[in-house]
Image: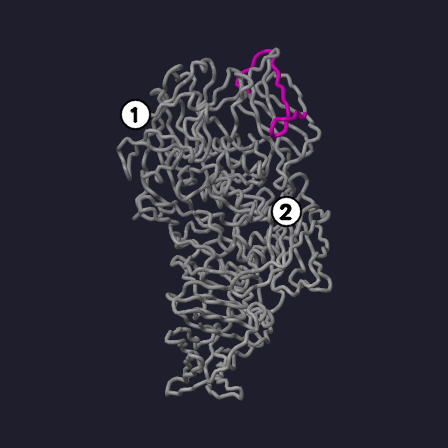
Amino acid sequence: MTHLIRVACFQAFLFAFSLPVFSQTNNSYERVYLSGKDVASAVQWDFKVSDGRNAGIWSKIPVPSNWELQGFGTFNYGHDHKDSKIKLGKEIGNYKTEFYADKDWKGKVIQLVFDGVMTDTEVKVNGKIVGDIHQGGFYRFKYDISKYLDFDDQNVLEVKVSKVSENESVNKAERESDFWIFGGIFRPVFLEILPKYHFSRIALNPKAGGEFQAVLTLDKYPKNARVDVELKTADEQTSLGKFSQVVNSDSVWLNHQFENVSSWNPESPKMYTAIFRLMEEGEILFEKKEKLGFRTVELRPKDGIYVNDVRVIFKGVNRHSFYPSTGRALSEENHLEDIRLMKEMNMNAVRMSHYIPDERFLELADSLGLFVLDEVTGWQDGYDTEIGPKLIKEAVLKDANHPSVVIWDHGNEGGWNFENEFAFHQYDIQKRPIIYPWLLRNDIDTFHYPTYDTREGRLDKSGEIFMPTEWLHGLYDGGLGAGLNDFWNKYKPNPLFAGGFLWVFSDEAVKRVDLDGKLDSDGNHAPDGILGPYREKEGSFYTIKSIWSPIQIHGFDSLDNNSKEIEVSNQYLYSDINGCKLQVDIFKIDAWSNLKIESSKEIKLPTVIPGETIKVKLDIPENWQDGDLIQLKSFGIHGELLNTWSKEIRKPKEGNPRYFGKGEFEIYPIKVRESVSDLQIEVDGRIYFFGKKSGNLEMVKVNRKFFYLSQNPLIEGIESQVKDVTWKKLDDGSIQVKSMFDSYPKEVTWTVLPTSELKFVAKAPGQIGAEEELLGVGFIYPEAKMEEANLIANGPYRVWGNRLEGVNFGLWNKKFNNTQTASNFEELIYPEFKGYYSNFHALQIKTADGEIDIRTETPGLFLSLFKPQFPENSTKGVLPVQTKSDISFLYKIPSIGTKFHTAEEMSPKNESTKAFNEELILWFRFR
């Protein structure tokens, strides 16, 4: 049975979040949904698919949705067309539903609107085709169905959707792309109920400063008609002015100056409501409301992109409209979550890759504040000159009035047709910049994936505005936060730099309902995100948040008791930080139990205009250095937490005795047993086994329990062979085992103390060369025995040599997990357990056999805590050098590259050597 929909059913939930139904007049704009407003409120329609899963059977499907996620048809990734062994889904979906046409609609214009269908769409009402087949999968299209309706009765709507287009350029642009290929009605379907006289289009151009322009298009208009325009606050409680304009043409240009309005920008996204009324002799013939923001966009050649006369730096990311369980059919909560996460990362911009977004996403970008680059599809092939201008027109007509949309993208990486550009100019009265992502054109260079020293000399030599629209490709754990600080510090001082857009927001792994719900990213094609598929926060999330914080702190690391001063820099584009605050907390570390707060102070910041830096004295106690950890938080113009910095108050040699207490250790006799192969040193029920050939720790036995912690006989990062091993008893009863090496570390000494403690000392390397990607010493321990770890270091996320920002000194508890970013999706537990950690002070390992405490006296060490297992599809750039050991203590760790470039290509050249004259000292305790 087909689904019956009556007007009364829709009135209860009409348009809670888009263009509202206006009740003050019978001639107001009205919208009636035939589907759900989004995927969360989807409505069941009748459905049959021609091929693939569940083919040939009429059943039900929620609308909107992608049919693959509902158990129909065939899953394909866009690259599948290159592989003759893969079946390409070319199915056709047939939809059917019924709706009631109210008798009061008779004599009105009834538009049937589709917000997105993949891809060729034939529409029938009551058995009659209502217009041409629409081609193009991401665009709003509509039909006037007034003459096809039976009023005061049910009407049958049939929609035939061909997943593959008859237009080859549509397939090239949309279906043979580097993203998942879906089918179906994936965005809402609704009716627009319009009076005989109405505006067929309202095009807005509200400029910064209150200058208001608009063009109203009418299909027909009566004699003696005029347009009344009233501007109100967003909540419509206060009127800010009115004006009128006589209508004597089907295209009406409006110009007016509104006073006392604020400009829109992403830091203060001030919105208003404009009410447009078509009038005749005092009667309202039609009324429609539009949300708007006043702002002006300019591209000034060889200078920059300006919004409201301010040169902007885009801190942006690329975003697919995607969720694992629903594909490209999204909900209000999906859009809200994504925008909130972008704002949490201190981003101010998003690029719609590679198609225009849902209407609701742009409404939220308007109200919450994001710059948007809105993109007409064309991954690496463009639309032809017949279909291209039509789809550009549909994109502009749908999205042009949103203040968040500041730039149009015409395709991607060759996915354009220059002959079609005219359509943007024809329909966009704001004349926004039109860019070609990856190309230098229209006075802006958007080159993708530059290396640190890009040979083309872009930015440094071209003299053009530079803004990479894809940047620091995030395959697995590479790119994104890794390398961002280096690039940002290089690019930002250049006045031609307009920011950039990281690739990409989240991993595009689809829930394969045909494979028992497995998450599939098509190998290494789609797992490129800062976030996991369900928006799990990876380490780069916090790196980006720190680097792009609009309040930056300098001098915190060198804070001392003499000045207690830091520098505060305002890196907002539009906002004074007067009234923003800093919070300074002092903590003590109570062994492995917790952090205890000793003091907390808030500091209100004075007037600091964008781009200015001032000195701020921290209001902290005189005895603040009696604590162990100082933490600084910054809060933004809306009271939101922008970033957190924390650092140790003292180095580990002085810090560790304070964290754990100096302790009173009993003295025990030491026994030594020497065999042909090893040396067994026993004290207080503990037996330490050392190999006589290399002088290396082999294992430890504690009260009949074995800890299989063994020193890796090979030094990490450099080839070094043992030359000589000796042992002796010291005057205090300690036993010392010494190994001499032919290279670093020259000398390693193990000392078993009468307290039962174990001390390790490796001679300092002196000079570390640029060619060494890591350097230090390591130990083997069976991973299967691991349960959890406590860590006093920078955390809780792992770091790379080029991703050291976004972590903070503290006490971190880490449950063992085997999470591998963007690979084993079913076990994404963050923070990851395995990897490198900076600023190591102490480690407690909890195992199946007992506990091991390891503490250092050496400042600036890195800890390597087991080895991440890199996915089999890793490219060279995301396969950094790994330790041979399971647990390592290192002076230096490697950087990581991207899918396309090695770490060396993504980092500043480093040909110097670094002096490191600190011995590597570790203390071990076994329980």
SS type, badge 1: loop
Residue 331, percent from left and from top? 45, 37
User: Which stretch is magenta?
Assistant: 218-240
Residue 239 within the segment the image draws in magenta: yes
Of residue 685 and residue 307, the one placed in the foreground of this image is 685
What's the amino acid at mark 2?
A: Gly
- Camera-nearest residue between 500 and 721: 721
Helix, strand or loop at label 2? It is loop
At a point 44% along the width and 60% down the height, the residue shown is 815
* Measured Cα–Cα span from mark 1 to mark 2: 55 Å
**Which quarter of the rendered picture does the C terminus lie within?**
bottom left
Q: Amino acid at mark 1?
A: Met
Q: Quadrant of residue 848?
A: bottom left
Relative height, residue 309 to residue 745 (above, below): above
Residue 46, image x, y percentages: 32, 29
- The x and y percentages for residue 195 are 51, 16
From the image, which quarter does the N terminus lie in?
Answer: top left
Total of numbered circles in the picture? 2
- Tell me the residue that label 2 is attached to: 636
Label 2: few (<14), some (14–19) or many (≥20) C-alpha neighbours in 10 Å: many
Lower sequence index among marks 1 and 2: 1
Q: Is residue 676 left or right of residue 405?
A: left
Tag 1 residue: 1
- Residue 336 in view: yes
Circle 1 residues within 10 Å: few <14, some 14–19, many ≥20:
few
Q: Contact (CB < 8 A) between labels 1 and 2? A: no
Q: Residue furthest left?
A: 56
Q: Nearer the viewer, residue 91 or 748?
A: 748
Front of the two marks 1 and 2:
2
Based on the picture, tell me whether residue 884 belongs to the magenta stretch.
no
Residue 168, position in %: x, y?
39, 37
